[in-house]
Image: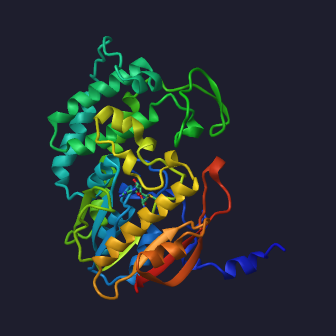
Amino acid sequence: MAVTQDELYATLDLDLSWSEAALPERVRTKHVHRVHPYHGKFIPQLVEILLGRYIEPGGHVLDPFAGSGTTLVQALESGYDATGVDIAAFNCLLMRVKTAPYDLAELGEELRDACARIDSLVPRRSRVPRRRYLRDWYAPQAAAELFAFRDLIPDYRHADVLRVVLSRAARSARRAAHFDLEAPREPQIGEYWCHKHRRTCRPVESAAGFLRRYTLDTLERIEEFARVRDVEREARVVHGDAREDALGGPFDGVLTSPPYPGLIDYHEQHRYAYELLGLDDRREREIGAAAFGTSLAAIEAYRAGIVAVLARAAAELRPGAPVLVVVNDRRDLYGEILARAGLRLEERLRRHVNRRTGRRAGEYYEDVLVARPA
Ligand SMILES: C[S@@+](CC[C@H](N)C(=O)[O-])C[C@H]1O[C@@H](n2cnc3c(N)ncnc32)[C@H](O)[C@@H]1O
């Protein structure tokens, strides 16, 4: 028998569940959280509450699956030090750009200068992309503009900020349907019916407008974050495999959302950045990547990977410190994972995840597992 809404809500932690009206997208992606889109992140408001509930202010937080750096950014805002580990080079670039301390006057001067030069980018006709991906996914004009902007980057001290701007513009300028920017499968050539805009749309021809807009937007977002971050606190980013590389403890808590088996390819979702920037591709070390599938062997490899990471993280915790894991455990894997990692589950909180985006909308819940070394 179906449960009533009251029964359903009685099982939820309502402090961790927000409606779209209470927490609109623009607030969930405030300041640097939106310097580049990232599919599969959690929201800073959830991190804020969990840090406040479970970890002493001023502590050092570890996120071994740090992704786009939501934990790190919120930690700096809430007055914690943070370390984030991720296997994907683009995610680490993004995290460094979000969390680095800046001389805002110098950053502003550089980004405005780069922006002014976009108008005079004269694409050279001869530069047809050599790489197949870039040839397939970009109109010739867009590719030429992206290459010309990339050529400017070494002129600036804040080159990494401009690399993120280039990547964001490259994402928007792909020949992808507007409603399918997260994981487009085939280049969209020619007009198409757009589910997002409810009209006929055309694939993008040029990248210059995106480059200009995102350069200034990134500056604004970094300035906005500078007004709320705690300048005494630091974030450290480790590009590595959390099963093996040094984590750099001791830590006062772990807060993380791990990858799920067979759901998202974290390198592939930012393929354009790897192609344009020549970033180190370590996709074969991604735990649970969609490309590995969901066979019994793949699920066991996933379990073993998460166990290894949590066990190593737990070994670097100060006595009594918590491990907080935000997960949609629909395969019921985490009871066993925690036990194998030497962790004792104290609480399993359930929250309702509000998913606004059209075609992926729907009822969706996730758990916050609160554990400590056994
Ligand atoms: C669910 S996402 C984390 C998202 C993050 N909470 C955020 O808000 O952006 C999981 C992350 O784990 C990373 N990952 C997968 N295998 C890894 C490994 N072996 N070591 C470190 N990170 C890994 C992926 O690259 C991905 O960014």
Residue 352 found in image quarter: bottom right
Residue 239 found in image quarter: bottom left
Residue 266 position within the rendered picture, expressed as x and y whole percent measured from the top left:
43, 48
Say if 297 sits above or below 228 in the image.
Answer: above
Q: Residue furthest front?
A: 297
Q: Residue furthest top?
A: 126
Residue 179 position within the rendered picture, expressed as x and y whole percent measured from the top left:
59, 39
Instruction: Residue at 79%, 75% (x, y): give it.
Output: 3
Query: Looking at the figure, which quarter contains the C terminus?
Result: bottom left
In the image, 267 versus 204, the foreground residue is 267
The answer to whether residue 333 is left or right of residue 35 is right
The answer to whether residue 180 is left or right of residue 118 is right
Instruction: Residue at 22%, 46% (x, y): give it.
Output: 108
In the image, 276 versus 132, the foreground residue is 132
Residue 221 position within the rendered picture, expressed as x and y whole percent measured from the top left:
34, 53
Query: Looking at the figure, which quarter contains the N terminus?
Result: bottom right
Instruction: Residue at 43%, 37% (x, y): give it.
Output: 171
Residue 49 in view in this figure: no
